[in-house]
Amino acid sequence: MNTSQQINAAEAAALYRSMRRIRRFEQTVKELSGTEILGPAHLYIGEEAVAVGVCANLTAKDYVTSTHRGHGHTLAKGAAMNRSFAELFGRATGYCKGKGGSMHLADFSVGMLGANGVVGGGFNIATGAALAIRQRHANDVAVCFFGDGASSRGTFHEAVNLAASWKLPVIYVCENNQWASTTRFDDIKNVDYLSQRAQGYGIPGITVDGNDVLSVRNAASHLIERARSGKGPSILECRTYRIDGHFITDPQAYRSQDEVREYKLHNDPIDRFTERMRLDGILTDADFAREDAAVEQELSAALEFARNSPYPQPSEALDDVYVQEEHHE
């Protein structure tokens, strides 16, 4: 099936722009790390098609939970680039008022429940969100992004088991980027595809090419609509690749740089999508140039906003830490 035939020019431009937003954001974080960017950061470069393909099917009322590598999910879900940069710059206008940093971006207004510095920390949050949806009798869904390494955590199994038992509207999206920090997936796998683990819970499991944004979008659409209709959870494994290190200063002594270059050359999700849309006559070079210009303009304005924003005041150190005591007459 030619999935290009299922997309029009406006949809294709939106997918391209969303992936480019993430790529340029991450490239800028890498460039500014150690100077203006505060604290550690884990880049999403090379995995953009997963977040964009999944989130293309979601509304602002749907929930997502993220990982320590959460910038891409945050932006794909609709969060603003300027407030995201402000958070990484440690400024008061950031999403967590400059006190959360890279691994704690969140924007509840678009359903982004937060990145998470704990590996496997998003499973039960997403499952709880799905339970809340059920109790409200709504038709929204929750999506839990996680990595191949997190699939070996106990929280994965307990969350999926509970969601399957109660038929909760949650989709567990595994971003299998082949590396759990310094451990290669092939060295520890007990199944060829992580989606096969769904069989143990009696739910659907699908594996797709995570570097093909249309394949991700179409598979996610099927599973999300299934969840909305009350048929319960599922697992979507997206096979992708982490082009950069586990974190920005990672020396990457555990893998060959020839392997990395090979993926960059042949499997970059943005390059693949660009070539496909051009060959199929859906988007032109002028279309891509227009979207690139819009992203660069947003990026420039976002950096100016972050740099001109104030730092949080020392007196605000304990704000949002404790619940304020309420007095009722």
Image: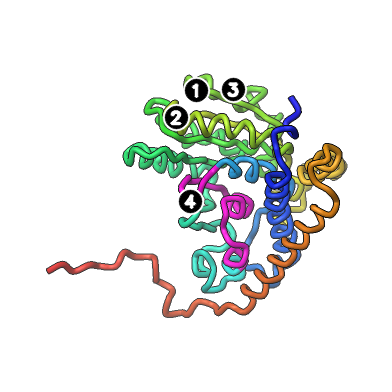
Which quadrant would residue 210 be assigned to in this image?
top right
- Image marks 3 and 1: residues in contact by CB distance under 8 Å: no
Amino acid type, label 2: Ser
Which quadrant would residue 282 be assigned to in this image?
top right
Q: Nearer the viewer, residue 26 or 288?
A: 288
Give the mark nearer the N terminus: 4 vs 2: 4
Query: Distance of mark 3 from mark 4, alpha carbons?
Result: 29 Å
Mark toward the viewer: 3 or 4: 4
Along the horizontal axis of the image, is 319 left or right of 281? left
Residue 274 drawn at (x, y percent): 81, 45
Mark toward the viewer: 3 or 1: 1
Along the horizontal axis of the image, is 284 left or right of 327? right
Which range of residues does the magenta coloring cover?
58-85
Give the mark nearer the N terminus: 1 vs 2: 1
75 drawn magenta: yes
User: Which quarter shows the N terminus?
Assistant: top right
Q: Is any atom of residue 69 visible in this view?
A: no
Give the mark nearer the N terminus: 3 vs 1: 3
> Which residue is located at x 44 percent, y 34 percent?
169
Judged from the image, the secondary structure of the residue bearing numbered disc 2 is loop
Relative to 158, say whether 325 is above or below.
below
State the mark number for residue 111.
4
Residue 162 drawn at (x, y percent): 40, 30
- Image marks 3 and 2: residues in contact by CB distance under 8 Å: no
Which residue is disc 2 drawn over? Answer: 229
Mark toward the viewer: 3 or 2: 2
Structural crowding at the residue carrying mark 1, measured as other residues with C-alpha within 10 Å and reported as few (<14), some (14–19) or many (≥20): many
